[in-house]
Amino acid sequence: KNEPVEKKNVTPKKQIPSDMIFVDGGTFSMGSNDGVQNEQPVHSVTQSSFYICNHEVTQLEYISIMEINPSIFGTEPAVGEKQENRPVEYVSWFDAIYYCNKKSIAEGRVPCYSILGETDPSLWRYRPHEGNNMDETVNCNFSANGYRLPTEAEWEFAARGGNKSKGYKYVGSNEIDSVGWSRENSQDKTHEVKKKNANELGLY
């Protein structure tokens, strides 16, 4: 007689969203001797593999989780562009980790950030977009499958093109207009994500 097998509570492996890019780890020269003082000196960093979204968080993505749009550029998109696809801005670091945990919970993922052991941001002593800070220590569980901000090294490694880097001056090109918005070409406003060329990893 076959006895029923007891089922254990196992957290299923979550599917990787299609807009997340896998960045294979490697060693790179971080920093710049031509930049501001806190970017000096150039030093070797070995970075492990990670995933990163291929675009900035849009206003629509932010609103769908936070139910508010704090962006200063909340109206009058450029001709032919959609307001909802412009990047969200006027978001503090604390607002950002609140968003990450809330989005993780909404998708059934394990949140990365915790404060006093609590990962549910609604239970933190913090309310987004009110200009306040948190005095408590914020911890990050880097092994969790939820969303988090990239570290400084992860961001620079990805921006440089990771192991596929061709050594461009800017993120994906030596010509800034082809890959980025600046004071000279933006008409003093933000623009839809993915309107410029991607870098070697497919990041915009």
Image (tube, rainbow, N blue to C red):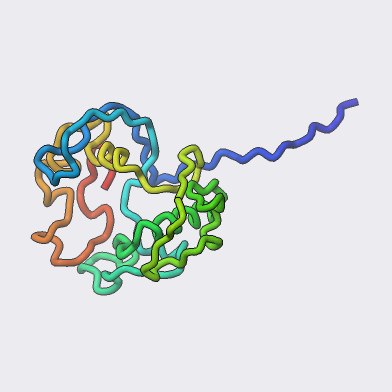
Task: Relative to 59, say whether 32 is above or below.
Answer: above
* Left or right, 194 with reference to 22: left
Query: Of residues 92 and 137, which is closer to you in this image?
Result: 137
Q: Is residue 106 visible?
A: yes
Q: Quadrant of residue 64?
A: bottom left
Q: Position of residue 153 (x, y in %)?
A: 29, 38
The residue drawn where x is 32% and y is 39% is 154
Residue at left offset 34%, top offset 29%: 25
Vertical arrangement, residue 200 with respect to residue 63, above or below: above
Q: In the rendered view of the protein, which quadrant contains the N terminus?
A: top right
Quarter of the rendering containing residue 9: top right
Q: 91 left or right of 32?
A: right
Residue 69 shows in this picture? no
Which residue: 24% across, 41% down? 159
Answer with the quarter of the image where residue 34 lies: top left
User: Which residue is outermost to the front?
Assistant: 135
Q: Is residue 106 left or right of residue 7?
A: left
Q: How many marks?
A: 0
Point out the residue furthest to the right here. 1
Spot occupied by residue 86 in the image (x, y as percentages of width and height): 29, 62
Residue drawn at x 54%, y 42% is 14
Query: Residue 121: x percent and y percent?
Result: 51, 59
| Apparent side of residue 47 relative to residue 159 in the rendered image (left or right) | right
